[in-house]
Image: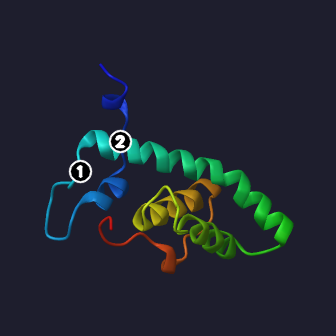
Amino acid sequence: MSDESQIEIPQSFIALFVEPGRTKPNASREHIAARYELCEDLANLLTQTAGTMQFSLGITERDVLERCQQGLLLEDSVVTPTEAQWVICRLAELMQWPMPAALTVTGPQA
């Protein structure tokens, strides 16, 4: 059994690849798994940055999440805008912070 077949991809991430009105993703499982691994790794890497940012700048959790999202949305980002939103949602989850409604993941991958 390959490593790829053992990766459990959350439905919230698969939903990024399902167009409105459709039920199946618009990308292969291999592509979705690769993108998921990248986004999950990115969210985990951002936990230390987010904690440091909140402590050193004295800003709210929401401000930290917004700043991280702005960084992920830069022109040369390795993630799409919807993947960036997912990463921020996952970061909030990992930090055990509430997710502001304005930052929730919506819609299919752009």
- Residue sitting nearer the eye, 19 or 10: 19
Element under disc 1: loop
| Badge 2 amino acid | Ala
- Residue sitting nearer the eye, 95 or 31: 31
Q: Residue at x 68, y 76 (%)?
A: 63
| Badge 1 amino acid | Ala
Q: Residues within 10 Å of mark 1 (few under 14, many from 20)?
A: few
Is residue 33 toward the left or the right of residue 86 in the image? left
Visual colour scheme: rainbow
Compared with residue 33, is residue 95 higher up or lower down, i.e. above or below? below
Q: Residue at x 46, y 58 (%)?
A: 79
Q: Position of residue 28 (x, y in %)?
A: 23, 44
Compared with residue 107, is residue 45 higher up or lower down, i.e. above or below? above
* Sooner in the amino-acid sequence: mark 2 or mark 1: 1
Q: Quadrant of the N terminus?
A: top left
Q: Quadrant of residue 58?
A: bottom right
Q: Position of residue 34 (x, y in %)?
A: 39, 41
Q: Residue at x 21, y 66 (%)?
A: 19
Which residue position holds label 1?
Answer: 27
Element under disc 2: helix
Q: Position of residue 94 (x, y in %)?
A: 59, 53
Q: Quadrant of residue 82?
A: bottom left
- Residue sitting nearer the eye, 95 or 14: 14
Is residue 53 toward the left or the right of residue 105 in the image? right
* Residue farthest toward the top in the current orientation of the protein: 1
Q: Quadrant of residue 21?
A: bottom left
Kindly indicate whether the residue at mark 1 contacts the one at mark 2 (C-beta within 8 angstroms). no
Which residue position holds label 2?
Answer: 33
Tell me the distance, in whole angstroms, between the alpha carbons under discs 2 and 1: 10 Å
Q: Quadrant of the C terminus?
A: bottom left
